[in-house]
Image (tube, grey):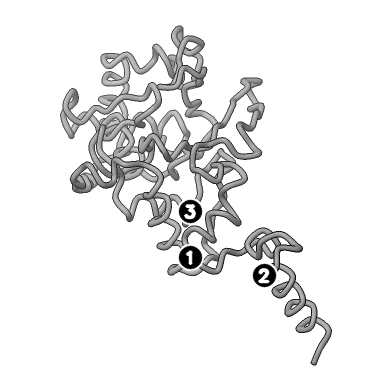
């Protein structure tokens, strides 16, 4: 019998008579836990907390952008059931697919990593476990994803000009600035739903947290980013104008001429 096997047999025996820590604490695995809980404990609890309340070892991370702005990034508090990145209308819970996309791809320009190397089964189990932290998942009916169909003219010069006017009319510049640098007159007054200071996005820095495609920019304008100061324009702006705003955003990001 190899020494490793003898070691673990001894550990099991000692744990059974109370002379060492319970097996879960001794080896970091709960044999009775579901796979999602095990994955969460190993990879997520350090930031999101073992209770999903964002009270892990890493409460926030402070970084400095090239422009000199200081940005604080906070882990998501899953107990609130409020999520920024959804394909559903504002106020709705995200779909399982939305959560799976975030787990799989991570979040650009934050400290949420990608878990593409994790098996699909593990990622789905993790999504299921995340949903246990808030009662909203049991109390509310699910919402449908918003359909996204990009017009062919998105990014064209004419659409960019229309989007520039929309940007002005909707007063996007008050937060994001005239040139999209996140330095508008209200940029230093913004707070999230928990009262923490936040900064509007600087479009000139390039990649968005939600990944930089016209479709993802459009869905952000449509759904808003719940919990932050970014509103939904689903009801206050025509679909065509939202796409024009996408075109102007791409211009600010230097992705179109």
- Foreground mark, 1 or 3? 1
- Residue with the mark numbered 3: 105
Which sits earlier in the primary sequence, circle 2 or circle 3? 2
**In the rendering, at what x and y percent does residue 43 appear?**
59, 54
**In the rendering, at what x and y percent does residue 250 appear?**
40, 35
- Residue with the mark numbered 1: 35
Distance, label 1 to label 2, CA atoms, is 24 Å
Q: Nearer the viewer, residue 3 or 104?
A: 3
Residue 126 showing in the rendered view: yes
Badge 2 crowding class, 10 Å Cα cut-off, few under 14, some 14 to 19, many 20 or more, is: few
Element under disc 2: helix
Residue lying furthest front in this view?
Answer: 17
Element under disc 3: helix
**In the rendering, at what x and y percent does residue 50 appear?**
55, 46
Which sits earlier in the primary sequence, circle 1 or circle 2? 2
Distance, label 2 to label 3, CA atoms, is 42 Å
Q: Which image quadrant is residue 219 in?
A: top left
Indicate left or right for 169 with 37 as reference: left
Badge 3 crowding class, 10 Å Cα cut-off, few under 14, some 14 to 19, many 20 or more, is: some
Q: Nearer the viewer, residue 142 or 101?
A: 142
Badge 1 crowding class, 10 Å Cα cut-off, few under 14, some 14 to 19, many 20 or more, is: some
Indicate left or right for 234 with 104 as reference: left
Residue at x 45% of width, y 7% of height: 185
Element under disc 1: helix
């Amino acid at each position: 019998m190899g020494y490793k096997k003898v070691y673990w047999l001894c550990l099991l025996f000692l744990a059974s008579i109370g002379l060492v820590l319970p097996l879960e604490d001794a080896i970091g695995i709960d044999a009775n836990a579901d796979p999602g809980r095990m994955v969460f404990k190993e990879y997520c609890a350090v930031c999101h907390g073992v209770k999903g309340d964002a009270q892990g070892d890493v409460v926030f991370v402070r970084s400095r952008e090239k422009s000199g702005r200081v940005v604080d990034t906070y882990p998501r508090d899953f107990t609130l059931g409020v999520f920024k990145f959804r394909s559903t209308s504002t106020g709705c819970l995200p779909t399982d697919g939305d959560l799976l996309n975030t787990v799989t791809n991570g979040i650009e320009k934050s400290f949420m990593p990608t878990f593409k190397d994790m098996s699909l089964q593990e990622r789905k189990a993790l999504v299921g476990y995340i949903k246990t932290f808030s009662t909203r998942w049991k109390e509310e009916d699910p919402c449908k994803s918003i359909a996204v169909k990009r017009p062919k003219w998105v990014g064209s010069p004419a659409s960019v000009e229309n989007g520039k006017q929309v940007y002005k009319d909707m007063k996007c510049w008050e937060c994001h600035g005239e040139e999209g640098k996140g330095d508008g007159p209200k940029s230093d007054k913004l707070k999230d739903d928990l009262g923490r200071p936040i900064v509007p996005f600087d479009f000139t820095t390039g990649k968005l947290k939600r990944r930089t495609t016209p479709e993802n920019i459009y869905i952000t304008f449509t759904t808003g980013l719940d919990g932050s100061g970014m509103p939904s324009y689903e009801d206050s702006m025509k679909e065509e104008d939202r796409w024009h705003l996408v075109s102007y955003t791409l211009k600010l990001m230097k992705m179109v001429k």
